Amino acid sequence: MSADRVPFTQKLLNLQVQRGPLSVGIDPHPFQLEQWGLADTPTGVRQFAESMASAAIAANVASVKLQAAFFERHGSAGVAVLEETLGTLRAAGVLTILDAKRGDIGTTMEAYAQSCLQPGSPLEADAVTVSPFLGYGSLAPAIELAGEHQRGVYVLALTSNPEAASIQDVGAPSIAQRLIERAEHDNNSVNLQGVVGLVIGATTAGRLAHLEPHLATFGGSILAPGVGAQGATPRSLACTFAHSRSQLVVPISRAVAETGPDVAQLVSRIGELNQDLGLALL
């Protein structure tokens, strides 16, 4: 199989075997810019993103997750920085996950998918996060386009925010379980082969316990935010995902960025975190 036809999940997890499970988060939040002594402007966002991307590339990470909202809040100039950063990472061979949580129906969902999963699109990324609130089936245009171009779609399934349980844990089986089952069904398809990943918070241990053993067979990767500022640790992550450690993609942003703006210090911190995660998840 040629390199450009390798399914997204296989490509990502193969890279992580060599480079570790850490996905560096680039989140140019106003407080982060202030910590770095940067203005909360498109110029400040560009300086922040350039340094974080340079560090991620130098540290040879498998992937980077970019939070679209912190770029979009600066309008077209901020989106231009997002485009540039995605292009820089792509040229360096680093896989990109655009955290945009898109969700809609029909042609609108198709347009969202084309904006970031279509090769050559301005916001071209290797994967995008999506919201299934309008029904898992509404995600079909994004899932199909991702399958066509060996990209990934991460479906919000079990998130860490306190409000999530009032929707995600409802029912028997729960909505979260149904989403996992639908992802497994799609990933077993000849045409999709692991296109669908799941977003499952690293701090959801209690809610996840009865579902986690089944994750090992769902066939995709798991984006597990929450390590660092939200309270999860590499050790707790290993316990929470006892049966699915090898599928984890672990985004960390603040715990990396707080060591900046010096790129060399960022590279060192990325290496430390990646090593800690790798040892914990063995």
Image (cartoon, rainbow, N blue to C red):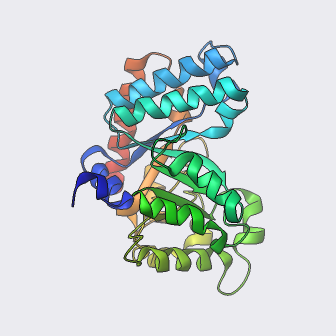
In the shown orientation, is residue 127 left or right of residue 105?
Answer: left
Query: Measuring 66% from the left and 54% from the top, which residue is drawn there?
Result: 102
Query: Measuring 54% from the left and 17% from the top, which residue is drawn there?
Result: 47
**Relative to 177, residue 269 above or below:** above
Asked if one can make out residue 90 in the rendered structure from this viewpoint, the answer is yes
Query: Residue 235 sits in which quadrant?
Result: bottom left
Quarter of the picture containing the C terminus is bottom left
Q: Position of residue 156 (x, y in %)?
A: 61, 62
Identify which residue, 207 or 125, lies in the foreground: 125
Q: Position of residue 219 (x, y in %)?
A: 40, 72
Query: Measuring 63% from the left and 25% from the top, which residue is drawn there?
Result: 32
**Relative to 8, residue 91 above or below:** above
Query: Measuring 38% from the left and 48% from the top, which residue is drawn there?
Result: 277
In the shown orientation, is residue 9 left or right of residue 214?
Answer: left
**Relative to 251, residue 45 above or below:** above
Quarter of the picture containing the N terminus is bottom left
**Relative to 24, residue 118 above or below:** below
Identify which residue, 261 or 197, lies in the foreground: 197
Specify the farthest residue to the left. Answer: 1
Q: Position of residue 244 (x, y in %)?
A: 40, 68
Q: Position of residue 95 (x, y in %)?
A: 39, 44
In the shown orientation, is residue 60 left or right of residue 170?
Answer: left
Query: Residue 48 sits in which quadrant?
Result: top right
Asked if one can make out residue 28 in the rendered structure from this viewpoint, the answer is no
Count of picture labels: 0
